[in-house]
Amino acid sequence: MSILYVSPHPDAFPSLRALIAARYGEAGDGPGWGGPHPRVCLQPPPSSRTPFPPPRLPALEQGPGGLWVWGAPAVAQLLWPAGLGGPGGSRAAVLVQQWVSYADTELIPAACGATLPALGLRSPGQDPQAALGALGKALSPLEDWLRLHTYLAGDAPTLADLAAVTALLLPFRYVLDPAVRRIWATASNTPQYVEAAWYPWWERQGFFKPEYGRSSVSAPNPRGVFMMCIPPPNVTGSLHLGHALTNAIQDSLTRWHRMRGETTLWNPGCDHAGIATQVVVEKKLWREQGLNRHQLGREAFLEEVWKWKEEKGDRIYHQLKKLGSSLDWDRACFTMDPKLSVAVTEAFVRLHEEGVIYRSTRLVNWSCTLNSAISDIEVDKKELTGRTLLSVPGYKEKVEFGVLVSFAYKVQGSDSDEEVVVATTRIETMLGDVAVAVHPKDPRYQHLKGKSVIHPFLSRSLPVVFDDFVDMEFGTGAVKITPAHDQNDYEVGQRHGLEAISIMDSKGALVNVPPPFLGMPRFEARKAVLAALKEQGLFRGIEDNPMVVPLCNRSKDVVEPLLRPQWYVRCGEMAQAASAAVTRGDLRILPEAHQRTWHSWMDNIRDWCISRQLWWGHRIPAYFITVNDPAVPPGEDPDGRYWVSGRTEAEAREKAAREFGVSLDKISLQQDEDVLDTWFSSGLFPFSIFGWPNQSEDLSVFYPGTLLETGHDILFFWVARMVMLGLKLTGRLPFREVYLHAIVRDAHGRKMSKSLGNVIDPLDVIHGVSLQGLHDQLLNSNLDPTEVEKAKEGQKADFPAGIPECGTDALRFGLCAYTSQGRDINLDVNRILGYRHFCNKLWNATKFALRGLGKNFVPLPTSKPEGRESLVDRWIRSRLTEAVRLSNEGFQAYDFPAITTAQYSFWLYELCDVYLECLKPVLNGVDQVAAECARQTLYTCLDVGLRLLSPFMPFVTEELFQRLPRRTAAAPASLCVTPYPEPSECSWKDPEAEAAFELALSITRAVRSLRADYNLTRTRPDCFLEVADEATGTLASAVSVYVQALASAGVVAVLALGAPAPQGCAVAVASNRCSIHLQLQGLVDPARELGKLQAKRSEAQRQAQRLRERRAAAGYSAKVPLEVQEADEAKLQQTEAELRKVDEAIALFQKML
């Protein structure tokens, strides 16, 4: 067994060189001696076994008593013989040896000399700056070579690349900026390499900070200020496509504003996610220690939560960095940070003192599993079409839902055994019924005014009340009223003065009911009540009933409406102010369609319950007062007078003493055990992150913010509350504009769901994942085994070969390209892969352009045209001007598809497909003035084009931009802080050039069409242009050289006016003033082509006849759907057009016989 001895130190670059060589050797034919691959040993070999004292690493032993090789060059060569580039003496092998020698003799000494001082290993008399200078000098030949080549030798990695890369690992890690790095490992753009180094450098240089390039954030900036805060993701969260979309949009906007020179801040933050975090830590405690939080105690439990947060809580930040998000991480905030906690306390106290926050007993969404109230956004609505059995936490058997149970209440005092039949989907709640309601105009129940019905299990009668909310057409027109367990019933009870009797405790067990129901879990009571009704003969039937079951999205428990004393925010006046701000235009909501939703919510807003029965979160700064004075009666929880708030307990005590007119020593306080709804602290986020209520430079500069960008699904839960609280507490709107993006769905338009197997992790799109990898993720989820199999089938259908590596740039660009205002996004990963290919096109086009520019190219100080540009130079500058205009207008209007389409079209269809092709003969020609003019134009296209793309594709554009020479020595170090192209800079619109060049493109399209029709793929047929007038002829002559390059034509000649075209030409029309005659004589076999065309004509005639007969059939227009008729008509028109073309071709070939 061969052994490879290497150093375990991560910076031991000679050993890394050997290990990488071993890996490449494994991918090929194995080690040079043909034996098995070596075993790796992380220590020196025993000195007794080595033939060379002292042992140097790496070292390779070919079996006991076999060949010994030491030192990185020899070991690497033996392990990776294919890395030599070819047989000894070949050009490639000589080139490899040259660069290996250069790495060993020049790069390694320079790299070590520059790096060791940074590691504290500076030798006496050593000048660190001189050492860095020496390293730069050693890198210069590499820089020059790699500007025009992908690898140091040949078209694939070799030992030369390996030697250079490993020699520079130390300076890359410790002293070099990415701006001087190069990637040798790929022949084309490979995202994992391109995206690896730039983000740490950007962050280290401070490019994302608003202070960059200015003395302070408050320094006057004529360009203005742009501030946006991130929708704070949950601390428990991991990246999903919603985050990816949000950050792709937000980061592109932020980068655009930053490149425009504005004082730009995109402020990061993270939400403490009360329920989600508490659930995660409780599960962890139970799994690891077998304890619940009550056994641990509140303080100890909170210590465990903070410990978990410190260990795991920054995962989402690392993932955001993977997306290239240019956030100012030094300003990152956590909603439980002391600064933000002070703001939360201040807000609560102020609002409580004003009476905006008050205590009340009302119905809330209650999770019996969490033992807490939850917000509306934490309630999932599961739609049922009929009878369905659902799993409910705490119950061994599934529970029946989706049925309507009818039963009878006997009318009290009726001699005829009269009854009123009611129906309910929650039969157990009849134990809390206090009335039966009917519509005031229902003639069936007019005689029951003033009467009551008898409850079969309780010693109370239920009055019959008349209320407009009852639907006379539903069921019997009579409904049971349970004010303590249904919102509509609660409101009916309030209107009619009915008692609200709670029949469930916080865990869902029945209370305030007689045996045998007392103490039963609610869904066991469901079965017991049904059985009891049947036993008493009151059961009247059961039927399927479509319904929506509210589920807690954290615990999956069925949400129960329960009456609980809680803290509420009075929202009426604040909502009016928020609505008025939009009406006045002070706050702009985009897309405008959401403004109607905004006003509807504000007009119908209910007071906001902000209490949560949790331990993790901002504990409510409110205290229940006990007055130790017999003259003061004891208070009850719902009585707001016995509650006081305070920034400290001492302040609260003073308030209480003043309120009751007693001394401080007679006041006892008990702080509320509950915490505030997470959305309360999130609602303060735009100003709490800057230290409010205390004044600060950041608060004065960055509040109010500029923009709030988020998904439309949290318009009410977060956006509205930020606006209401911002106006109330600061007197100012928190931002001037709100842009709401769509929801991401799968390629089929379905909502993403784990059970469907269509949930896509953005990191899987970025890095790629196999189908098995997707399956493995399902196994690690909490899906039922049956759902796992269903999800696997979904994955297999959508991603049969897994998800290919697309990279961050392609994902960002694709998501923004999808973002049409007001529409949901049906994400097709294949389209993202298309943008990965676009990145490759950028890479290859820039590589080609750099070769065309040449080693000694120097760009002019400005991009202003010289006046000697050719027609195609003028045309591409004009098209670039249009791309710049559309990009800036798109950003201003949040029209992301318009921006991405403009940039994609410019790069792919205009620069690559047209300009670069037209440039090839120019750069290889003898006219040096034209060539230099073309090079300057080409450089301008690269420079401006990369700057245009940078907000969407920051990684690949930075990598390519760093390879370009600079116009001036004072140019910014990074693309991300280079000015964004603006119409004032790129004002080269040239309608005359565009109109002239359009003729070249029209001719090219016509020639290409003819070449395709006649399968002329490998020949360059001559082309003759027939023009209608001299002006068109002059123009056609001017563009003929471009047609030749673009259409792969032979001779392109303009016929004299009235002159006939040569025999044997196919004809096509380029425009109303120009026709194309493409020479086929001698290029095709007329007889053979006629045979193929006759067969094609017969088939087309049969198809056309079938379509005509189908459309002429009786009843066609009445019975066949309109869209099918339209499709048939389009097919017939297409078939007839094909027939005409075939007939023209037949006539042509008959003349050639």
Image (spheres, rainbow, N blue to C red):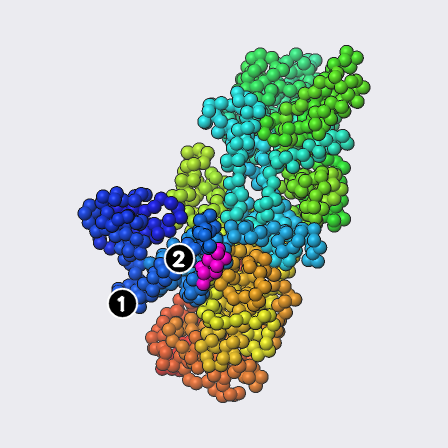
Which quarter of the picture shows residue 114? bottom left
Three-letter amino acid code at disc 2? Pro
| 451 or 234, nearer to the observer | 234
State the residue lying farthest toward the front: 125
Q: Is residue 40 left or right of residue 496?
A: left
Compared with residue 207, is residue 300 higher up or lower down, i.e. above or below? above
| 964 or 817, nearer to the observer | 964
Residue at screen point 81% across, 19% down? 661
Residue bearing the label numbered 1:
89
At label 1, counting other C-alpha atoms closer than 10 Å, the crowd grade (few under 14, some 14-19, many 20 or more) is: few
Which quarter of the picture shows residue 873? bottom right
**From the viewer's perspective, is the residue at label 2 or at label 1 nearer?**
2
**In the rendering, at what x and y percent does residue 667 appear?**
74, 18
Magenta stretch, main secondary structure class: helix
Q: Secondary structure at mark 2?
A: helix
**In the rendering, at what x and y percent does residue 8 appear?**
35, 44
State the residue lying farthest toward the left: 65
Q: Marks 2 and 1, how far apart in space?
A: 28 Å
Q: Is residue 1076 left or right of residue 890?
A: left
Residue at screen point 56% across, 15% down? 519
At label 2, counting other C-alpha atoms closer than 10 Å, the crowd grade (few under 14, some 14-19, many 20 or more) is: some
Residue bearing the label numbered 2:
109
Q: Earlier in the sequence, mark 2 or mark 1?
A: 1
* Span colored in magenta: 127-137
Does residue 189 belong to the magenta stretch? no
Three-letter amino acid code at disc 1? Gly
**In the rendered view of the protein, which quadrant contains the C terminus?**
bottom left
Q: Is there any visible trace of residue 735 in the rendered image?
A: no
**In the rendering, at what x and y percent does residue 348 appear?**
70, 32
Q: Secondary structure at mark 1?
A: loop
Residue at screen point 42% across, 79% down? 1050
